[in-house]
């Protein structure tokens, strides 16, 4: 977005949006940009037939758009607040230029499945898969795995792939954890199997899949 602004500053001082044609989320998208090159011509809830770009809630606002925001009248008492998309749609009707740049993908984290998908993607694509706690030599690691400091893992546990153990969490002896996030101070008891799940302290998040090996 910054690169696009630097290259077209004389025509794009108002607003630059971001969008993506590919989504990693199961949640439906509600706002799409209709475009002509890098210019936005319309925003609607229906994807256009050509180059559908789902809007991402991230924009680069120039001086013209910030002035427009400052001049907006307050929302009347009892009336629903306008979303950013509604404000941008109204701004487009003033004739001011709006441009858009395309991201490789977008992911709306609205469900447990979305959070697991994001965790898997970041572990696979980034440099964040590190083991920052001491583990017993009998622990089996199947990359990618991220283990924060101050994590306890028992003997003969199996971790991975796509596992993130947050600081203060613990995994018992002989436990198996795959495609999962074990949140801060959550506990996986000895001998249990956690697959495609999120474990939080004192709560089992809906749709969690924790099965005993016994």
Image (tube, rainbow, N blue to C red):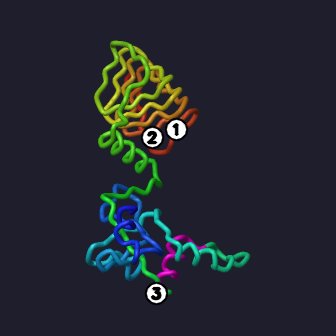
Looking at the rendered structure, the secondary structure element under dot 3 is loop
Looking at the rendered structure, the secondary structure element under dot 2 is loop
Distance from the alpha carbon under mark 1 to that under mark 2: 6 Å
Please state the horizontal and vertical placement of residue 27, each as a whole percent of the image: 41, 60
Residue wearing tag 2: 208
The one nearer the camera, 127 or 181, is 127
Does the residue at mark 1 contact the one at mark 2 (Cβ under 8 Å)? yes
Earlier along the polypeptide chain: callout 3 or callout 1? 3
Is 91 magenta? The answer is: yes
Q: Tell me if residue 198 comes above or below residue 94 in the rendering.
A: above
Quadrant that contains the N terminus: bottom left
Q: Tell me if residue 83 comes above or below residue 145 in the rendering.
A: below
Earlier along the polypeptide chain: callout 3 or callout 2? 3
Please state the horizontal and vertical placement of residue 71, each as a whole percent of the image: 64, 79
Quadrant that contains the C terminus: top left
Q: Please report the bounds of the magenta region as a residue range.
A: 82-93
Q: Quadrant of residue 9?
A: bottom left
Specify few, some or many for label 2: CA neighbours under 10 Å numbering under 14, 14-19, or 20 or more: some
Distance from the alpha carbon under mark 3 to that under mark 2: 49 Å
Please state the horizontal and vertical placement of residue 175, each as a whole percent of the image: 39, 23
Q: Tell me if residue 145 comes above or below residue 134 in the rendering.
A: below
Residue shown at 45%/74% (left/top)? 13
Main SS of the magenta part reads: helix
Residue wearing tag 1: 204
Residue wearing tag 3: 95
């Amino acid at each position: 977005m910054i690169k696009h602004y630097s290259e077209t500053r004389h025509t794009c001082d108002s607003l630059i949006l971001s969008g993506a044609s590919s989504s990693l989320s199961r949640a439906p998208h509600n706002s799409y940009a209709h475009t002509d090159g890098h210019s936005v011509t319309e925003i609607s809830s229906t994807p256009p037939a050509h180059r559908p770009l789902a809007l991402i809630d991230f924009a680069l606002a120039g001086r013209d758009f910030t002035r427009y925001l400052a001049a907006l009248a307050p929302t009347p008492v009892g009336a629903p607040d306008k979303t950013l998309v509604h404000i941008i749609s109204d701004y487009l009707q003033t004739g001011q230029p709006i441009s858009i740049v395309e991201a490789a993908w977008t992911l709306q984290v609205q469900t447990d499945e979305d959070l697991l998908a994001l965790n898997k993607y970041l572990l696979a694509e980034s440099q964040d898969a590190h083991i920052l706690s001491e583990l017993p030599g009998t622990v089996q690691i199947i990359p990618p795995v991220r283990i924060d400091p101050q994590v306890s893992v028992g003997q003969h546990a199996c971790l991975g792939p796509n596992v993130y153990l947050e600081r203060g969490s613990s995994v018992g002896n002989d436990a198996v954890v795959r495609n999962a996030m074990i949140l801060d101070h959550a506990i996986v008891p000895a001998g249990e199997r956690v697959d495609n799940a999120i474990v939080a302290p004192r709560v089992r998040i809906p749709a969690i899949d924790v099965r005993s090996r016994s």
